[in-house]
Amino acid sequence: MDLELRHKTVIVTGGSRGIGAGICAAFAQEGANVVLNYRSQEEQARAFAHSLEQRWGVTVLPVQADVTCPQEVERLFRQAQDAFGPPDVLVNNAVGGVTFKPFQELTYEEWKAAQAGIVDHVFFMSQHFLRECIQASKPGRIIHILSKSSFLSSSVDNLTYVANKGALAALTRGMAKEFIRHGVFVNGIIPGYVNTRAHQEDSPRTAQIRQMLPLGELAQPQEIGNVAVILASPLFRQMIGAIVDCTGGTML
Ligand SMILES: NC(=O)c1ccc[n+]([C@@H]2O[C@H](COP(=O)([O-])OP(=O)(O)OC[C@H]3O[C@@H](n4cnc5c(N)ncnc54)[C@H](OP(=O)(O)O)[C@@H]3O)[C@@H](O)[C@H]2O)c1
């Protein structure tokens, strides 16, 4: 099936590694041009962008920006606009600022850092994106990368993550309802246990996790990307505020 993403432009935050990299790869495979946002690993981002260009014949623009900073978000959109014109798809994937601690020991700075690293950048990025769609009178797609923690208190000492991923789920539904009048579709994905820095294939903890996974294996990052391209496709207009369970059956 042609998902009609060829020559479209997608912006992916935190795109140089982990799930973000899998999302960039899936869009490049569909023929979309990619604005690959990264924060700190320039060499890795540039090498990855180059490898996608070589493999899929698309243009991949690595853009360094801390998306928790409004001025840097503005610059990111300017660079994207200069390279490709107004973008078609935004994937809010980046995550940062999380502190694992008992609730009573958290400082207010730690609490605010997680809000910045999980929710605030979604506000900055999505507001820019929506304004560009309205200004250019063109439709758009926004995809949020959520977590099981958006709906379940999946672990203890993890409330900075749980609270803000929960907020992101509420934001997904609320934005979907509000933005659709401008032709901007907002949906979300819940990854399960994905082969990333958090769950490395060969760690002892992963060996334990694998035993309780219905498929007996971690998801690969591009499996999440493969769902993202469906949510970005103009063929699927009935998905508005949908939150897709990609947890490999671990929320059943
Ligand atoms: N891994 C899983 O199994 C899993 C499960 C459920 C949900 N998720 C969700 O999936 C998404 C990706 O997770 P992941 O495990 O792939 O994450 P990751 O490996 O920790 O990568 C996060 C990426 O976000 C970037 N980033 C963080 N803060 C940023 C900022 N302020 N500005 C720009 N980039 C920033 C990081 O850049 P730096 O390298 O510079 O820090 C990194 O590239 C997250 O939203 C996460 O909550 C993951």
Image (tube, rainbow, N blue to C red):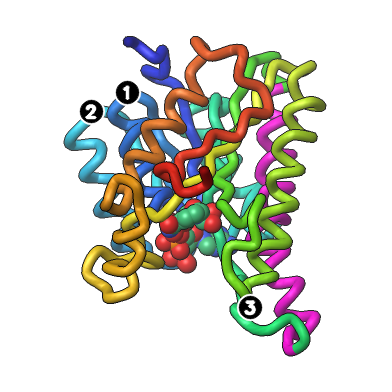
Q: Residue at x 73, y 89 (%)?
A: 105
For label 3, the crowd category at 10 Å Cα-Cα, with few meaning under 14, some 14 to 19 and many 20 or more, is: some
Residue position for label 2: 57
Name the amino acid type tagged 1: Gly
Residue position for label 1: 31
For residue 110: magenta?
yes
Q: Which mark, by number, is residue 157?
A: 3
Viewer-proximal residue among 16 and 128: 16
Q: Is residue 234 left or right of residue 182?
A: left
> In the image, is residue 165 above or below residue 78?
below
Q: Are marks 2 and 1 in contact (CB under 8 Å)?
A: yes
Q: Are marks 2 and 3 in contact (CB under 8 Å)?
A: no
Q: Nearer the viewer, mark 2 or mark 3?
A: 3
Q: Which mark, by number, is residue 95?
A: none
Q: Is residue 42 visible?
A: yes
Q: Is residue 71 visible?
A: no
- Could you say which quadrant of the image residue 145 lies in? top right
Viewer-proximal residue among 217 and 202: 217
How many angstroms separate mark 2 from mark 1 (CA)?
8 Å
Q: Secondary structure at mark 3?
A: loop
Where is residue 84 shown, x and y percent of the image? 48, 28
What span is colored magenta in the figure? 105-133
Q: Nearer the viewer, mark 2 or mark 1?
A: 1
Q: Secondary structure at mark 2?
A: loop
